[in-house]
Amino acid sequence: MPDLRRKLPSSHALFVFDAAARNGSFTAAAAELNVTQPAVSRMLGQFEDYLGVRLFDRTNGRAALTEDGEILYRHVSDGFRSIEGGLIEIDRRRKGTETVTLSVSSAFTTHWLMPRIDKLQRQFPTVDLRFQLISGPLRGPVDNVDLGMRFRDRYDPERNGALVMKEVMLPICSPAYRDADSADGPIEPNTIIRLADTPGDWAAEYPAFLTKRSGPAKSLSFSDYAVVVQAALLGQGIALGWLTVAAHWLLTGALVPASETLSTTQRLCELVHPHDRSIRPVVGEIRDWIIEQMRSDMAAIDRLYPRLRLMPASY
């Protein structure tokens, strides 16, 4: 922080810079800050002189960020968002509420968490939940959130993750798709619903599916796994179902196994908190709630489909 103070003419310069960068106009920034346009121009000119670089290209009444300006704006906006988030959290704690941000897949949120969200809110009535959603494979660092669901190789060292379950998949489809009747004519061959960017042809690992369909397989490919599962729910084909996502629909019967064989990997599904800070008590409680609910789901599916031997595969 002493270094930061030496690098700035004043902290107010950052607020003026942020307003001008967001608006792309000194005039609009002046209106937002309730000052005159010359005052904004003078402040930013002094800021540029102090830093020894140009932050804006001023042309035709517009203020476009230079490359140096883009770098500074990225860090300033991230910093302001973090500060604002902290102030909001303090205010909510003062009022008896806490904010918890989860970095999870859109598929997990849509198909596993949403059917349970009322139960979660009853369990944690003073928590405001926020979501950082990932549409494709779960990857990337867990930053600026409280908790993230990620997969890692079980042999990779990790100290800040709690096991949800091993990575277990199962071909799934709707009951109507599985039980299609040929009485009204030939049945279309199987359609395989894929998640784009997933390596390998997973369907080739299954010599037969529990459907009455035969012939060459067709395919549908989506970049969002939430849509993959939705397509299976609508009877559009067979999807590879990650049990961490599809558990709810298997328990309700909206989806059924399209095979009696599970797929397993060397990866673990974990709930991870950021390395740079300790986990808050309420975050730990939400983490444990999700893990307990998931284990309960796996036990129920194991009872429903004992041939799968799901529990030994999952834990």
Image (tube, rainbow, N blue to C red):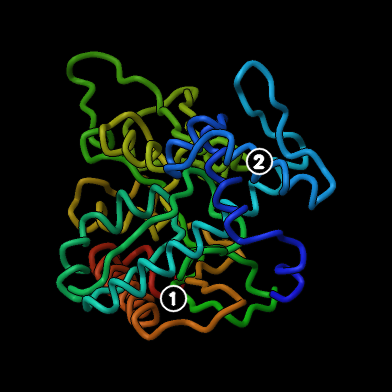
Name which quarter of the figure residue 96 lies in.
bottom left
Residue toward you, 254 or 153: 153
Type of amino acid under label 1: Pro
Q: Reply above or below: 180 against 315.
A: above
Q: Reply above or below: 49 against 100.
A: above
Residue 63 on image: x %, y %: 63, 28
Q: In this view, does 54 lie to the left or right of 89?
A: right
Residue at 61% in and 56% down: 140
Type of amino acid under label 2: Arg
Residue at 38% in and 56% down: 131
Residue at 27% in and 32% down: 235
On residue 42, the disc is 2
Residue toward you, 128 or 268: 128
Labelled pair 2, 1 in contact (Cβ < 8 Å): no
Residue 104 on image: x %, y %: 44, 57
Q: In this view, does 290 lie to the left or right of 41?
A: left
What secondary structure is marked by label 1? Answer: helix
Residue 53 on image: x %, y %: 82, 43
Give the class, few, some or many, for how many residues have Cα within 10 Å of label 1's Cα (few <14, many ≥20): few
Q: Is residue 68 left or right of residue 12?
A: right
Q: Mark 1 points at which residue?
A: 312
